[in-house]
Amino acid sequence: MARTPVIGGNWKMNTTRVEAQALLRDLRTRLDALAGVEVVVCPPAAWLGDAADVLGGSSIEVGAQNVYWEPKGAFTGEVSAPMLVGTATQVIIGHSERRHVFGETDEATNRKLRAVLEAGLHPILAIGELREEAEGGQTEAVLRRQITGAFEGFDALPGDLVVAYEPVWAIGTGLAATAEDAQERCAMVRRILTERFDASSADACRIQYGGSVNAGNAAGFAAGADIDGVLVGGASLDGAAFEAICRAFVA
Ligand code: 13P
């Protein structure tokens, strides 16, 4: 199954508006019409409109970093999936910082997933184990629990969904997984998806690795048969580094 690699840039809570506009323009210059990969830029919610303006008409897609599951109402500070329509096409759901800093549960992830799909947007579902879970041999059980929880009540694996495998111990630490370990874990995710759904939809699903990806280690991840792209944090704030990462996935 040929899967087009998808490279995501998760800016997290970084950039002033002026910095964001400059980075968006830089990324457009570097990456517009880059063939063979899909590129998704996920700026803070405050700059999604700027991203849609600067990247409009380019091949670069805009993603949101989070969403609330209700469509509208008295939920001060939240942004709904229908509100993202027209600016973003993708939404990261279940990022480890949402889970571990903001206490989001698998049930919340499930609700967000449903809301995103209902709005016609494409989810990037992030999963991954903590260091102590990895050290305790719990990785597979944790990934299975997160996948089962996220897809509670689903009859089929949504076609345009990307799974981002991001071991929490590798995020923002500079300690990326080895290419071999990342490949092994992404294959594990695909196996769990096969068991939960079926082989053909799991085979078609794109699975990213995330966690301290940079211009130097991206090619190693690109070589993994089950690694269909990366979700990049810190290095996505540097136009040249993000360009190099994207180019590492061009066949
Ligand atoms: P870093 O690339 O900064 O480790 O962050 C990874 C991440 O959390 C992307 O979502």
Image (cartoon, grey):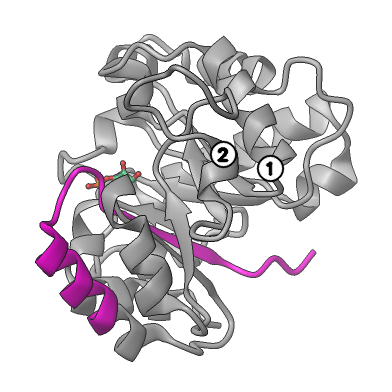
Q: In the image, which disc is placed on residue 89?
A: none
Mark identifier at residue 119: 1
Is residue 22 a member of the stretch shown in magenta?
A: yes
Kindly identify the amino acid type of the residue bearing the numbered disc 1: Ala
Q: Locate the C terminus and report the quarter of the image it occupies.
A: bottom right
Q: Residue at x 38, y 46 (%)?
A: 210
Q: Earlier in the sequence, mark 2 or mark 1?
A: 2
Residue 157: % across, % down: 80, 37
x and y, in percent, of residue 200 in the image: 88, 48
The crowd level at tag 1 (other Cα within 10 Å; few <14, some 14-19, many 20+) is: some
Q: Circle 1 — which element?
A: loop
For the question of whether residue 32 can be seen, the reply is yes
Where residue 140 sits, quadrant-wise, is: top right
Residue plotted at (18% across, 41% down) = 172
Bounds of the magenta segment:
1-26
Which residue, given by chain and number where applicable, does mark 2 sit on? 81
Residue found 23% across the figure and 69% down from its top: 216
